[in-house]
Image (spheres, rainbow, N blue to C red):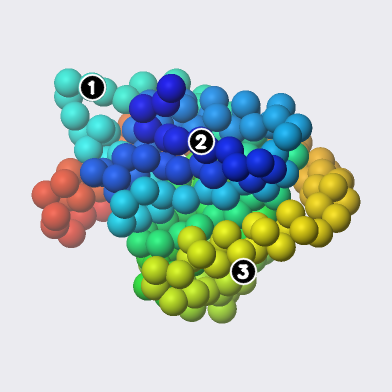
Amino acid sequence: MYKTVELVKEGRLARLTLNRPEAMNAMDDVMMEELADVLELLKTDTTVQVVVINGAGRAFSAGGDIKKMVDPNSPLDIGKVMVHVSRLAKALYALPQITIAVVHGAAAGLGFSLVLACDYIVAEETSKLAMNFIGIGLVPDGGGHFFLKERVGVPQAKKLIWTGKVMNGEEALAKGLIDEVVADGQAAAFAQGYAQKLLAAPIASMIATKHILHEQKTAELENVLAMESEAQVKMRKTEDHLEGIQAFVAKRKPEFKGK
């Protein structure tokens, strides 16, 4: 049914897998749209109470697909892409299920925004977590500003966004960005155990609490998403962004000029 994601239901548990392993689950326009579609579908599914989100292959997600950004044969329509990015962030935050992010390898850029939007985050020790849009002259999207601020507050959010710092599991835990660190290769098993604990708990009341807390913030998230979309369209036209993606592809250090 989907080309880039896979949804499997096991009773009251659903497993959502980002499935472009050959590209480290980098999100192209197809994946962004499919993720938004799947999450909106889950929003109406009353049979599922826990959603586990993971990545196929050797990473959770390397973020937005930079190769697509520089491919002259398939230019990304940034305005259209941002609509899907906003849809998926809003749907994920509003899900009437408890969401668990399972991180191994990279969770960068939009991939990290997706992780931070989840209720519970488990990461392996050598994971690489980064809000690294700054490296290509962009701003966080997918609600990255909102989800970072919710986890660590405004001053720390600014610092993480402006530096694009890459953190391993222990560093991310120390900053309060994630909930659990496990040994490499153990995240999936840990998440499965945690999901079973949730399903054995009075989970309907937990979901009600999530709804009460999240509902207060929905308008703020929508405002952030609109501002991120506007800023991203603007940043895509800057000289610094062009230099950033060209340097990334050429594997050289970018020379930014603030333009």
Residue of label 1 = 74
Marks 3/2: CA distance?
24 Å
Image coordinates of residue 202 in percent, x first then y, are: 85, 55
Q: Which of marks 1 and 3 is in front?
A: 3
Looking at the rendered structure, the secondary structure element under dot 1 is loop
Q: In which quarter of the image is the C terminus?
A: top left
Marks 2/1: CA distance?
27 Å
Q: Earlier in the sequence, mark 3 or mark 2?
A: 2
Residue of label 3 = 179
Q: Can residue 150 be seen in this view?
A: no
Looking at the rendered structure, the secondary structure element under dot 3 is loop
Quarter of the rendering containing residue 95: top right
Residue at image coords 48%, 61%: 188
Q: Which of marks 2 and 1 is in front?
A: 2
Image coordinates of residue 102 in percent, x first then y, are: 50, 58
Q: Earlier in the sequence, mark 2 or mark 1?
A: 2
Q: What residue type is labelled 3?
A: Asp
Q: Which residue lies furthest to the front in this view?
A: 11
Q: Which of 184 and 240 is in front in this view?
A: 184
